[in-house]
Amino acid sequence: MATLEVEGLAKSFGGVQAVRGVSFAVAPGEMLALIGPNGAGKSTCFNMLNGQLRPDAGRVWLRGQDITGLAPRRVWRLGVGRTFQITATFGSMTVLENVQMALLSHQRRLGGLWTPVRAMDCAPAEALLARLGMAEQAERPCGILAYGDLKRVELAIALANDPALLLMDEPTAGMAPQERVALMALTAGIARERGIAVLFTEHDMDVVFAHADRILVLDRGALIAQGAPAAVRADPRVREVYLGA
Ligand code: ADP
Ligand code: MG
């Protein structure tokens, strides 16, 4: 079964048809890139998938369950994680503490264990940070981290919720090119290990072609192409509207 299935998704703002009848699916462990020029409707799609925006038309299923129009909190509880362009961590708390808070919140969501933070076992948070290459930074306050490291913490926080689907809207914005490739390589590895479906937007085509299993191309609210990176790259319509070639 697909992790996410979307059919006929549409949204208008006043007279602007931001998204018009978009349909696609994402499989467990798959890295799916959503690309398209500015204003194509990428963020609007994301906002409809995580419940921030109610679609005018269309349906969204998560692991077969209809989640169309559910509030963001409920969508998150059902296993949709999201990373944001502006990172949100507690700056005066350490990296480890931030991740522990996220794990604690996940445990409570699963119903139960009202462990106080101070009584928590550090091992799961430490293991997660180690997997993200952040073991050395565990005791540093988030407030003093370099931007690229903060992005990794944010990814750790999203992963702490054990998502089935991870939505990443421009995850590498503001990062240096090598950092971008590294972050997405890491994300792809973890997605495959854990069977997490990842939908991401990205402006850097090198990153997209290196790490997407499949690509969706959005232009003025409509999908104009989808497929494997090589096929999308060769598609004349895509070259015309998006790659400018
Ligand atoms: P992208 O993320 O691909 O750059 P967006 O989804 O942000 O595109 O925007 C798609 C279109 O919808 C644009 O024309 C944008 O101006 C418009 N739009 C997005 N959000 C709103 C909003 N809240 N109110 C009015 N128009 C919006
Ligand atoms: Mg956007």
Image (cartoon, helix red, strand yellow):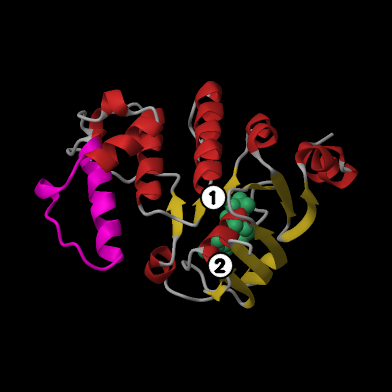
| Numbered-mark total | 2
User: SS class of the residue under badge 1?
Assistant: loop
Q: Say whether residue 97 is magenta.
A: yes
10 Å neighbourhood of mark 2: few (<14), some, or many (≥20)? some
The residue sitting at 28% across, 41% down in the picture is: 125
Q: Quadrant of the N terminus?
A: bottom right
Which residue is the site of mark 2?
A: 63
Residue in the picture at 59% in, 71% down = 60
Question: With respect to residue 138, does 36 lie above or below?
Answer: below
Q: Tell me if residue 90 can be seen.
A: no
Q: Amino acid at mark 2?
A: Arg
Task: Answer above or below: position of 2 versus 70.
Answer: above
- Based on the picture, tell me whether residue 133 belongs to the magenta stretch: no
Q: Residues within 10 Å of mark 1 (few under 14, many from 20)?
A: some
Residue at point 20% right, 35% down? 94
Looking at the image, tell me whether mark 1 or mark 2 is earlier in sequence order. 2
Q: Is residue 159 above or below residue 17?
A: above
Compared with 79, 87 (above or below) is above
Is residue 211 visible in the rendered image? The answer is yes
Q: CA distance from mark 1 to mark 2?
A: 12 Å
Q: Could you tell me which secondary element the residue under label 2 belongs to?
A: loop
**Residue 20 position in % (x across, y down):** 71, 68
Q: Is 171 on the left or on the right of 159, as rendered?
A: right
Circle 1 sits on which residue?
Answer: 195
User: Which range is magenta?
Assistant: 96-122
**Residue 131 placement: quadrant:** top left
Could you say where residue 124 lies in the image, as x and y percent from the top left? 28, 42
